[in-house]
Amino acid sequence: MKRVIETSNAPKAIGPYSQAVEVGDTLYISGQIPLDPETIKVVYGGIKEQTVQVLKNIGAILEAAGYSYKDVVKSTCLLANMEDFKDMNEVYGQFYTENQPARAAFAVKELPLNVLIEIETIAVK
């Protein structure tokens, strides 16, 4: 059974997709970019500030679905510039302090709204 997850504590989807979809005990969170959910504007600052906002958005979706960061099993990090990897990784590690999920990180040519990072997430109960 498929359950669509939506919360006002994370940015609304800006296209034909859901913030997240739960199937069974698995939650698939769409790629989150550093939008402030109240203003729907990109947060100011560099990769560290943008990574914090992305992970806060992911946290809000996890919470709305009844999950936590501890339930995350896989993250895919898309970076506008691989030179930002070290700083992104430093922030990422503050959110995943134990039993870290599997992860991949890629540099991509361009991200929506010219942001520096997008992260998609899979969590399992």
Image: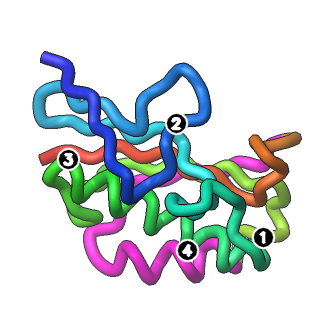
Q: Residue at x 77, y 59 (%)?
A: 116
**From the viewer's perspective, is the residue at label 4 or at label 1 nearer?**
4
Q: Residue at x 58, y 82 (%)?
A: 90
Whether the residues at callouts 2 and 1 have beta carbons within 8 Å, the answer is no
Task: Identify the element where label 2 is drawn.
Answer: loop
17 vs 41: above or below = above
**From the viewer's perspective, is the residue at label 1 or at label 3 nearer?**
3
**From the viewer's perspective, is the residue at label 2 or at label 4 nearer?**
2
User: Measured from the top left, where is residue 71 in percent x and y?
Assistant: 21, 56
118 relative position to 123: left or right: right
The residue singled out by tag 3 in the image is: 65
Label 2 sits on what residue type?
Ala
Task: Identify the element where label 3 is drawn.
Answer: helix
Q: Give whichever of discs 2 and 4 has the lower sequence position.
A: 2
User: Measured from the top left, where is residue 84 in percent x and y?
Assistant: 78, 70
116 relative position to 5: left or right: right
The residue singled out by tag 2 in the image is: 13
Q: Residue at x 54, y 42 (%)?
A: 31
Cα distance, mark 2 to mark 1? 25 Å
The residue singled out by tag 4 in the image is: 52
The residue singled out by tag 1 in the image is: 84
27 relative position to 111: left or right: left
Residue extending farthest to the front is 39
Q: Give whichever of discs 4 and 1 has the lower sequence position.
A: 4
46 relative position to 98: left or right: right
94 vs 62: above or below = below
Residue 90 among magenta residues? yes
Q: Residue at x 87, y 41 (%)?
A: 109
Cα distance, mark 4 to mark 1? 13 Å
Cα distance, mark 1 to mark 3? 30 Å
